[in-house]
Amino acid sequence: MKNKRRIYMVILFCTVISTMMSYAENKTYSDYQGFYVNGTKIYDGNGAIFKPVGCNTLFMYWDKGGEKTISGMGKTSANCVRMFWATDSNVPVSDLEDAIRSAVDNQLAVIVGIWDATGKWNHLHRCVDYWLRDDVKAVVQKYEKYFMLNIANEAGDETIPEEDFEKKYIEVVKKLRDAGYRVPLMIDPANWGRDERYILNCGEKILASDPLKNIIFSWHPWDINQPRSRYTNAIRASIEKNLCMIVGEFSHLGANYEGPLDWRPLVEECNRYDIGWLPWAWCLAGDKHNIVENFDLEQITLWGKQVLFEMEQVSAKASIFKK
């Protein structure tokens, strides 16, 4: 009789724990209304497919809260903005919140990336630590309906072994999910974002490690003199592996102005396979990659006219902004 009672108590205990865990999961995830990944596509909170087509921006130090940048971009056909950010303690989190709020007011989905680890693998932890700050997390969660979290811009150079890249990002994804982040986590490949093999060879295990399966990979094909086939093969391979990939940076010139970059075939292949693309960059003083000068849409460059025209052909606002 005592044994039966013990068995009953064990079963009852397990049932209670299971019910509590189920409730906690429902409380954590069922009310989520933000962007999410399903297979190779991104969906908004209404369940509509969202193809991010927008611009990279650098306003943190030069245009407080993105006041000029975001209002100008809001007048274009861009549907999202990718924001340069850093862990600089001299820049308050309120500046980031102001920029995010402005983007939402201008019907732009928000991608924020931390630049501290660009080319520096040993600085990746700085980016992660920033995201783990309570004040930063509070801002992201406040706007999670509109937000995609780019963990670190281009962390690591070409010397990073693929197994290290995979292992580290699995650890990072766990930390961010354990901290309560539900938004899509965006991961750039190493080698300054250029080497698609980090996505194609490591992406499946990184994605599998995420309990929410809410991972976007962002390729930055800055190499000049590339055949169209490189773009086609990378995109096709990501689709075959059921990975969600976008092109997160490119321009009409190499990163260091080392020559022209034939960007039209890249955009054409992105459009052919219906993946997102974000040109570099809205404005930085004296930069040859500028889409506009002086943060002013009236001072659009030739590159800006060309790429914004292409954007007009394919960009659509997220359905969450439609009344």
Image (cartoon, helix red, strand yellow):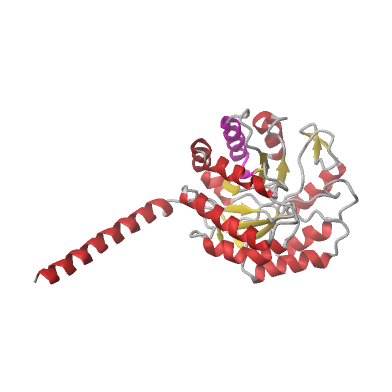
The picture places residue 9, in percent across and down from the top left corner, at 18, 64
Q: Is residue 76 visible?
A: no
Q: In the picture provided, is 299 more to the left or to the right than 61?
A: right
| In the depicted structure, whether residue 275 falls above or below residue 298 | below
Residue name at image x 66 percent, y 71 percent:
240
Q: In the picture provided, is 277 more to the left or to the right than 253?
A: left
Q: In the picture provided, is 10 more to the left or to the right than 156?
A: left
Residue name at image x 57 percent, y 30 percent:
94
The picture places residue 299, in percent across and down from the top left corner, at 83, 34
Quarter of the N terminus within the rendering: bottom left
Question: Of residues 213 and 142, which is closer to you in this image?
Answer: 213
Q: Is residue 213 visible?
A: yes
Q: Residue furthest left?
A: 1
The picture places residue 64, in percent across and down from the top left corner, at 67, 29
| In the depicted structure, whether residue 136 falls above or below residue 28 | above
Count of labels in the image: 0
Q: Is residue 98 magenta?
A: yes
Q: Which contiguous range is marked in magenta?
A: 93-113
Quarter of the C terminus within the rendering: top right
Q: Is residue 203 magenta?
A: no
Question: Of residues 208 and 144, which is closer to you in this image?
Answer: 208
Residue name at image x 62 percent, y 36 percent:
87
For residue 159, which quarter of the picture?
bottom right
Classified by dominant secondary structure, the portion drawn in magenta counts as helix
The picture places residue 14, in percent across and down from the top left corner, at 26, 63
Question: Of residues 90 and 236, which is closer to you in this image?
Answer: 90
For residue 85, which quarter of the picture?
top right
